[in-house]
Image (cartoon, helix red, strand yellow):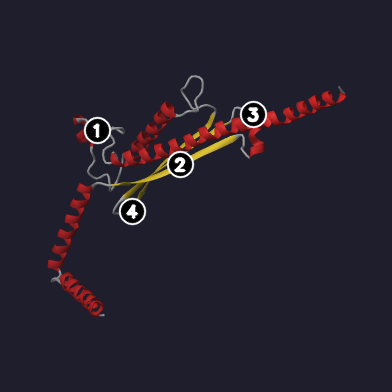
Amino acid sequence: MYNLKSKKGSTTVEAALIIPIIFLSIITLIYVSIFLYEQAYIKSLADRAAERGAAIWKNPESDMYISLVKLEHFKDNDPYWKVIDYKEKSKKEKVENYIKNSLKQYSILQSGDKKVPMNTTDIQFDVEVKNYLVYKKLTVTVKKNFKLPIGNILSIFGIGNTVSIQAKSEALINDPSEFIRNTDFAIDMGKRIDNLTGNNFEKIKDKVNNFLDGIKSKFSKN
């Protein structure tokens, strides 16, 4: 009888030690799966926001979802936005609103009223435009910080009280028709300047071409 009670007591002690670990392991796997989904979704959202933001950048009245411009808004298109973009702030706000609305609709971690992500302590958006003279690049960064509802229980697995999820994406702001017009204008101006200077540019061009042809012929013989 003593041995039987002793075995039951040891089983109870073992269960008291193992069951909480198993329970915490299951909770950890659930949260890791959720955060992996959130990471993939935020990355996809940043990619879409950058791509669609770049597509509508030349006309801020375009729809972010289908890039549709209503007929009455065609007159709002600024032909000189590449030189001085007076509507850059409103364009950035439009991209940020697109991100916010998408997060409210498809984020798994939500509060009870489903208006904001659950226990979200901080949501940061950064929309930046870099000008490289011949083209512009739109960079979108999305960062979400989640405060775990179970406190520091998962600290034994190396998971802190707050989990940060961040994604960054870039897209080129490209306007092919504008690029073609600018290229034609530059070529035309170059020809006019060349004519005014006695075709010096054309002479230099011929010398460079002859030099390159000479190098190519030497390599072809070898």
The tag earlier along the polypeptide, 4 or 2, is 4
Q: Quadrant of residue 151?
A: top right
The tag earlier along the polypeptide, 3 or 4, is 3
Gap between marks 1 and 4 measured at Cα: 27 Å
Q: Which percent across, then down, holds residue 74?
A: 20, 34
Q: Quadrant of the C terminus?
A: bottom left
Q: Is residue 201 left or right of residue 164?
A: left
- Amino acid type at circle 2 is Ala
- Amino acid type at circle 1 is Leu
Residue annotated with mark 3: 23
Label 3 residue SS: helix
Residue annotated with mark 4: 132
Gap between marks 1 and 2 measured at Cα: 27 Å
Label 4 residue SS: loop
Gap between marks 3 and 2 measured at Cα: 31 Å
Gap between marks 4 and 2 measured at Cα: 23 Å
Label 1 residue SS: loop
- Amino acid type at circle 3 is Phe
Q: Kindly indicate whether the residue at mark 2 contacts the one at mark 4 (C-beta within 8 angstroms).
A: no
The tag earlier along the polypeptide, 1 or 4, is 1
Against 120, residue 138 (above or below) is below
Q: Nearer the viewer, residue 172 or 163?
A: 163
Q: Residues within 10 Å of mark 1 (few under 14, many from 20)?
A: few
Gap between marks 1 and 3 measured at Cα: 51 Å
Against 221, residue 67 (above or below) is above
Q: Is residue 124 left or right of residue 154?
A: left
Residue annotated with mark 1: 68
Q: Quadrant of the N terminus?
A: top right
Residue annotated with mark 2: 167
